Image: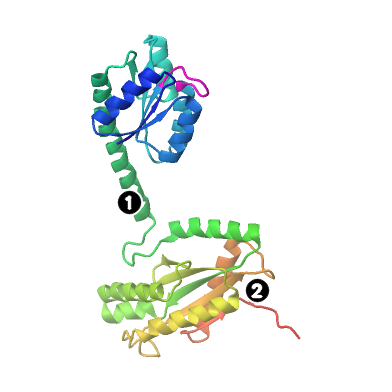
Amino acid sequence: MKVLVADDDFGSRLVAQAAVEHYGHECIVAADGSSAWELYKQHRPQVVVTDLMMPGLDGLELCRAIRSAEGDSYTYLVLVTSKDSHEDVVAGMHAGADDYVAKPLDPFVLHTRLLVAQRVTSLHTDLARYRAALAEQARTDPLTKLHNRLKLSEDLEQLHRKCARYGTDYSLAICDVDNFKRYNDIYGHQAGDSALQAVAASLTGESRQSDGIYRFGGEEFLFLLPGQSAAGAQTRLERALDAVQGLGIPHSGNPSGTLTLSAGLSAYVPEHRVSSERLLKEADIALYAAKSAGRNRIEVAPEARQPTRN
């Protein structure tokens, strides 16, 4: 483990450092609370052993600062005090300390505290990893492995806010597999699931790293295209639709004989600074227009089209 020792007394600091290193841990030392805080931010140790009374930040203030800054990680805090009174111990626990030891420091006692710290920090690391995995799972469509509507709502809000602040553009498009109900009726739902997986993989393969692709629901997919005007987004979507048709997935219930997509597109551009909810509605209406016009095509929302210049 990485252990930060903070103590303004040279002798106590030396004893603590020797004990930490003797038991196989990496030790960082600080002679006052302020430098300990800076070292904590720089190194993010798993354990901090801090004296109660120090220049700059005292032990209680250091504990509070660490607890407010650690985020998903967990730092085990051991408070060292020469006063060894009930009031000091309780104050330390309220400030965020996990344990305490009394001066003069006994290396064996510190060793036992570090064993407990190792166990506790390891559990917190595991919990953080499980939480991250669950959070990702909650934002991932289990069939296609694309992000889902929850992740979309988060990403769209963030992108829209950023573009509104800096005056930059983005486009969004809703894509729909043409005549997908007929596909399921003809080939079965298992084949339908396989087709959606193939479409998702194809769309992902045609996207840039900055693009967002989401399963919007059923046979619908949504593109978020940062930095793209409606014209640029349309070009990208044309390649995506061609790639899906190029898969050659047979679909006897579709006029083309293969699986195809239709798309509706809108854009957040200088001439059209509207809400993200409005863009979604416009893209949905444009998708309906693409379906009505014969499918296997892209329609751009009239509001997002670039004005022609004479």
Is residue 188 visible in the rendered image? The answer is yes
Identify the residue shown where x is 49% and y is 58%: 155
Viewport quadrant of the C terminus:
bottom right
Separation of residues labelled 1 and 2 (CA atoms):
40 Å
- Residue shown at the point (32%, 13%) measured from the top left: 104
Q: For residue 227, which quarter of the picture?
A: bottom right
Q: Is residue 99 visible?
A: no
Q: Which residue is mark 1?
A: 133
Where 92 sits versus 261, above or below?
above
- Residue 275 vertical position relative to residue 189 in the rendered view, above or below: above
Query: In which quadrant of the rendered view does residue 71 lie?
Result: top left
Residue position for label 2: 303
Element assignment for label 2: helix
Dominant secondary structure (helix, strand or loop) of the stretch shown in magenta: loop
Residue 293 percent across, percent down from the top left: 53, 86
Which one is nearer the viewer's eye here, 39 or 163?
Answer: 39
Is 36 rendered above or below residue 159?
Answer: above
Q: What secondary structure is marked by label 1?
A: helix
Residue 232 x %, y % = 56, 77
* Residue at 49% over, 55% down: 154
- Look at the image and give the residue range highlighted in magenta: 51-59
Amino acid type at circle 2 is: Glu
Which corner quadrant of the image does residue 200 belong to? bottom left
Q: Which mark is residue 282?
A: none
| Label 2 crowd bin: few (<14), some (14–19), many (20+), radius 10 Å | some
Q: Amino acid at mark 1?
A: Ala
